[in-house]
Image (cartoon, rainbow, N blue to C red):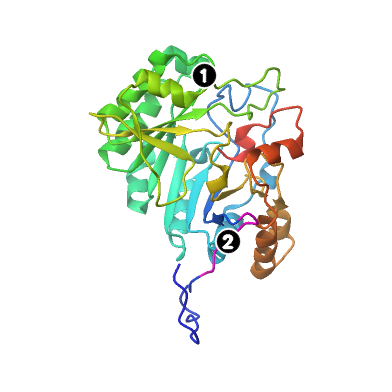
Amino acid sequence: MTALPRGTTAPQAQPGPVAGLLDNHGRRIDYLRLAITDRCNLRCRYCRPEEGVPFIPHPEILRFEELERLVRIFTTLGISKVRVTGGEPFSRRGCLDFLRRLKRIDRLQSLHVTTNGVKTARYLDELKEIGVAGINLSLDTLDPKRFWQITRRDYLAAVLETLYGALARNIPLKVNSVVLQDTSDQEILSLATLAEKHPITLRFIERMPFSGMTRVEEIINGDLSSRLQRIFPTITEEIQTITPTTARIFSIPGFKGKLGLIQGYSRLFCQRCNKVRITPAGMLKTCLYDDGALDLREFVRSGKTACEIGKEISKCINNRFVNGLAAEKACRREEEPSMSLIGG
């Protein structure tokens, strides 16, 4: 952001420039992932077991006004992009109104939503009207039987309605597909037809240790980059130079869209990570793999001022792990936490 000329101050009625958040490794933090619920209408086997992970009691989940207050504080510190996630965000009543409130925050430049698409189709007109900058849609297969095996639910038709509805409304769309150990080459090829026929980015994601179950075996992702090169011989990686990104982006001749690769388990993008997270229970996570760095719910509910909370956030971000490997080593978990408790 451009600094104010020397000797001038920002008018009180208008949002002035902010210095931005830099962590202790020189990484600029301008992206906040905001999980508004741990509830979800799917039970994806890599995210949450059918049973055994209790839902967070409602009083422990941040209220919308608390979430909005935190977003306002973060934007004064330099956050310009917010992504609303869950669980499944549309499982929480009032999600649309909350998005409208966030969109009115002056310093917030872009508002995004991540969804599994089960309930989203009915809200697409309103999301378009609100002006969300994009939707990330979770979709791991186009095969109904396989969808059931992965999600333990029979909602593929509803998810596809969201996908094609977003395309019809020209809402920017990314599709996120987790590659499991039993994901076949044919499944990857089938999913890739979405990017071949439509102007979307289809991003293949390494399976990560957030299933909510006891870890019984080492996660094996293989070299997905080499696998994509083998499946798509004409694939070419694009050089990303403008904004930080967790995804490597690839183009293929004849494709209207792009393919992407997110190596969250390999943790090859940590040096350019620009994001932090707030969990549904109000815990600030400066790394996906840490155990939580700051209890924001306690600060919000104890009556601390915005200035006091902002200072604690800045202090926390200035004590960030160098990468996800160091964060995971420090936590030494015997069980994998559920991604729904973190914010997908």
Span shown in magenta? 18-25
- Quote the CA–CA distance across marks 1 and 2: 38 Å
Relative horizontal placement of residue 289, taking residue 34 as reference (left or right)? right
Q: Residue at x 59, y 20 (%)?
A: 220
Q: Secondary structure at mark 2?
A: strand
The image quadrant where one finds the C terminus is top right
Q: Is the residue marked by circle 2 packed among few (<14), some (14-19), or many (20+) residues within 10 Å?
A: many
The spot of residue 177 in percent (x, y) is: 45, 27
Q: How far across and how far down the image is residue 189, in percent?
A: 35, 19
Instruction: Residue 30: give x, y in percent of width and height.
Output: 52, 56
Mark in front: 1 vs 2: 2
With respect to residue 48, does 28 lie above or below? below
- Disc 1: which residue: 150
Q: Which residue is mark 2?
A: 21
Any part of residue 56 in sight: no
Q: Amino acid at mark 1?
A: Ile
Give the main secondary structure of the magenta stretch: loop
Q: Amino acid at mark 2?
A: Leu
Q: Residue at x 44, y 20 (%)?
A: 227
Q: Would you say 2 lies left or right of 61 here?
A: left
In this view of the protein, which residue sits in the foreground, 258 or 239?
239
Front-most of residues 117 and 64: 117
Mark 1 vs mark 2: which is more N-terminal? 2
